[in-house]
Amino acid sequence: MGEKVSMRSFKHVIAALFTACLLAASLLNVEASEAGALKNAGAKGFANGASAAGTLLAAGSSKTESAKKAGSSDAAKKGKENTEKAGEGTKKKTEEKAKTTEKAKTTEKTPEAKTAEKTGKKAEEKTTSEKTEKKPEVKAAEKKAAEKKAAEKKAAEKKAEEKKTEVKETTASAIEKAKNNALTALSNRLSWSRGCVYVYRDYGLTKNHFTQRSKIFGKDKSLVKDMDENCGKKPYSGTTCIRCEQTGSKKDWGGWMFLNGYLKEWDGTPKPNDGKKGGAGLDLSGADALRFYARGKKGGEVVEFFTCGFGYDKNNKKTADNPDSSTRKSIGQIKLTKDWKEYVIPLKGADLSYIVCGFGYELNSKLNGKKDTVFYLDEIRFTGKIRSAQAAPVLLRSSDSNNKRLQNTAFTEDNALAALAFLSAGKKKEAKEILDAFLYAIQNDRAYGSAGSENGPKCVRNAYSSGDISAFPGWNSGTRLSGWYEEESGKWVEDQHQVGCSTGSNAFAALALVQYYNAYGDKTYLETARSLMDWVLKKCFDHSLGFTEGFDGWKESDTLDDYPLDNKPTKDNIIAYAAFSRLYEATGEEKYLEAAENAIRFIEMMYNERKGRFITGTLDEPLEEPQYVTTYGTWYGDLDGNLEETEEDNFIPDKRIIALNVQSLSALAMWDSFEPYLKTMNTIESMKVKKGGYPYNRNNKNGGWWAEGTAFTALMYRVFGKENKYEEAMKALVAIQNSNGLFPAATVNNFYTGLELSDGSSLKLTKDTHIAPSAWFIMAANGYNPFAPHGKP
């Protein structure tokens, strides 16, 4: 109860305090500021009252019940007195403030005084501002400088961005220009083979026609010396020319005729024409001239050059059962100079439908002062729109090498790549020409002739003769294969690997044929592709994972000249996987799907997860002790695998080299499922040389880099969206492009690969022009992956 009484007393004090404040406010008529002072005074009184009430409450709480009542009464009285005193103090202060306000009103300044005071204040402020504020011209200069600096910064940023764009556009422009040059070069190489028919270009070339020689003479044939067709003394072009020599005599004459000859089936030695055998003349209809270069050893030598006229005497009477369709064409006796000069025998209007004699010369000793005579010949050729040349099946020479093993060679893989490059650029005509040559090569292969022993699905060889691959008229040799003439024996020699058949060559050709079918829909090409891959299934499948390399040697032979190659190259299986996959899509035949799965399982088995790379394949010669056994068979060597024995055949990994091709090509072939093998990219990048190119082998012994590998690696980077790496590789290639638009095989001679040829010698590349890097460069620039459906992943 005592506590309640005390609280009531406290409330009464507060109420009294508020009443006093309100009363004081109502008595005063002051400005708003004075009302604020009143409010402050009231608040102060309230605070004093609250303090007194607090003291009263504290005191009352320590007494007895009766004392509490008395104390409460005294406190109430005392609080009332304090409140009254506070009210009086507030009233007094309010009155004093009112007096002060009234006094201020009486002393208020006049308007004029206020204006003057205000003007003076502004003048003072202006003076102060002028002291601290910069002059207008200074401010303008500073503003201009700031604007200039900002403009310069913006211009620099814009220039940097433009330069970056310009560099990118320049790179793209350079790549596009180089691509167009490469396309033109490949097209020219194809059309050049049709532009003329060579009698002689360089020694031993398969481009040469009329290869058989027949000596003509008066009384003494010994006066006419054998020609040196491999003379390297200052040729007009190429590496060789023909040296002709004749001993002087009082009244004798002599010379040589360049004849087509003929070859019986399975006879290795062609024979000169004797006029008895028909069908041994070339159809040169459409030729407008025979052109050649000649020079004398001393100058002044007199010689007559001619073409046609086989089977006629000097009076143009027939002397043979099968003579030329035209009599001799000549420009008469010519006096030679010491320098090379071109001579032309016009042929317009002549019947050139059957020509045995392509070229010849006669030298009369009397006209040469009875002296020994020496002169030289080069670049003998028929020109014009020769119909037989225009329609001939033509393959591109792979390399411009002077190596006798390569100078006549048109590798199947390289030509398939060229066809794919043409497809990537939409050049149907050029692609078709190469693929039609493959069709001709298969249909006219000597292995399938009357004496051939090959049955079942047909295949392509690893290489053919470059240029026109059709047999000469009267030559029962079938499709012309790659080879060379041995100078000492004069015999034609063929390389056992080039005339052999492999999984890789057939798969590349099949891939080009299927992609052509996909683009243009001619089933002839699809059926040919099926035949090639059916041959792989029949001849290169040993009922274990992967496909073997194939065969070296002559498949038309029943002897041991056919050498099986039981090793399994990873690269060949990569190409086979792509070819089988595209065939399955085109035909829906399950056997091709199963074959593709077999190839891909082998490729996956070749992957070393720990080292992040693919090995080059397996060897065909087992070692004595296996290191361990995997789920796929017994392995020899350092490979990751599940150590579980199976009944699979033994596999011997070929770890002799770390090759670029199996790394990059596997990525292109497995473009949609390569994620588990992405560590391979690190291996590829580790092989890059400083100039942006890539070598064949990581053990790059003599420096330099491989143009073909760099080109397909560039394509691989583009397929996987690595544009910077793509551009870097392409820029490196642009820098080494030859003036003819093609690319060298390597950037240095004797470029190390680590591979061996069939004769056991080391395979070394050179700086000679090659068509394969050109083809891959074109596909890379076009973003065309030949292993993907329609070339577009």
Image: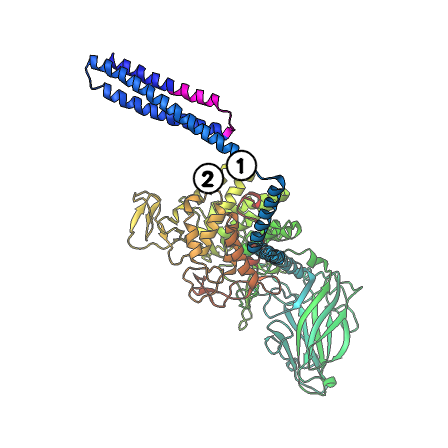
Q: Amino acid at mark 2?
A: Glu
Q: Let me know if residue 23 is in the magenta part.
A: yes
| Image position of 283 (left or right of 171) | right
Distance in Å between CA atoms under marks 2 and 1: 11 Å
- Mark 1 = which residue? 588
Position of the C terminus, as image quadrant, is top right
Considering depth in this image, is 152 or 587 the residue closer to the camera?
152
- Residue range in magenta is 17-32
When asked about the image quadrant of residue 349, the answer is: bottom right
Is any atom of residue 31 visible in this view? Answer: yes
Q: Let me know if residue 335 is in the magenta part.
A: no
Give the percent coordinates (x, y) of residue 411.
55, 58
Give the percent coordinates (x, y) of residue 457.
53, 46
Q: Amino acid at mark 1?
A: Gly
- Mark 2 = which residue? 594
Task: Please rate how many residues cluster around mark 1, counting C-alpha atoms within 10 Å: few if below 14, some from 14 to 19, many from 20.
Answer: few
